[in-house]
Image: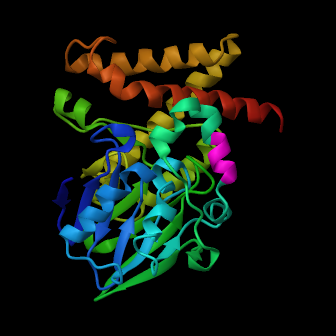
Amino acid sequence: MSVISLGENIYQVDVCDQGVTERTSCYIILAEKVTIIETGATPGIGRLVEATKSLGVSPEQLAYIIVSHIHLDHSGGTGALLREFPKAQVLVHPRGAKHLIEPSRLINAARQLYGASFDVLFGEIYPVPEELVHTPEDGETLNLGGGRTLTIYHAPGHARHHMILHDPASRGIFSGDCLGCHYPLVSRLIGCPYILPITPPSEFDPAAFMETFDRLAGLNLENVYFTHFGRVADASVIISRNKELVRVFAETGRHVLAAGGGLKEIEEALWSMLWGELSQYGKFDRNNSITEVLATDMGLNAGGIANYFERMKKR
């Protein structure tokens, strides 16, 4: 377990989601009211608890646990974490609260997707007591004491139950999945941050994404604290890249489907775009480690794009 200080009393913890390093970051803010942002899945909770101990945080000191949205790689460990910090208040988007309180639908949906791997990847999903759950309104502020305040914004696009946290002290945003994923391995290979949007089923919404991006562009941001993975500077560049690629992803799906293609062809088109983009940094092929790092997300992105246009047909 390693805890990385990022300045402004923000600490990053790699919870080794799905047994993989540099996949999922949780963050601890050491303010008067200590706050954990994102829990990851239950198997990583031990790492998060050890991180709090190494920082001298007692069970009574943790005030808030905040999850950006209820996908299990972000919130699945919330109930388990509360067993260690029973006085903490949990903040979650209003659309997601019922699924933390009664997680059976989340569990069933994930079991259908992951099959026999579910228990290894996600472990036990414990319900969160309703009396500990708070559902912030859009634009609500959270006073951490000592002049530290977070502003919480609802941020649809990736999911309707998504919210982000603006931290003026660090000129940062804790972005969940609304600004996609940062891939440290790829970034090291090409010598600059590599980021892709995440557009999974079943709530990917390009128009909502654009509204979220425009809102973020007005916040005078410098740092993005990615759940997947780590801090990256130049927030304005990250926002612009996401805006352009979400547009490209949607147009790619539209053209593929209009030509009679389907999910497989959308994914192939996304891979083609990716390899074309990376080719400017040297020769890459599908047999190297980049493919392994990106494969799951590329499949999810294609699925979300196909699902979006299927939903549009039914309107």
User: Would you say residue 301 sits in the magenta stretch?
Assistant: no
Q: In which quarter of the image is the C terminus?
A: top right
How many numbered discs, if any? 0
Q: Residue at x 69, y 50 (%)?
A: 105
Q: Residue at x 19, y 15 (%)?
A: 282
Q: Is residue 67 visible?
A: no
Q: Residue at x 45, y 28 (%)?
A: 296
Q: Position of residue 139 (x, y in %)?
A: 53, 74
Q: In this view, does 119 lie above or below 75?
A: above
Q: Is residue 137 above or below residue 209?
A: below
From the viewer's perspective, is 194 left or right of 132? left
Q: Secondary structure of the magenta portion, mostly?
A: helix
From the viewer's perspective, is 37 left or right of 54? right
Q: Which of 158 and 240 is in front in this view?
A: 158
Q: Position of residue 135 (x, y in %)?
A: 60, 73
What segment carries the magenta color? Answer: 104-109
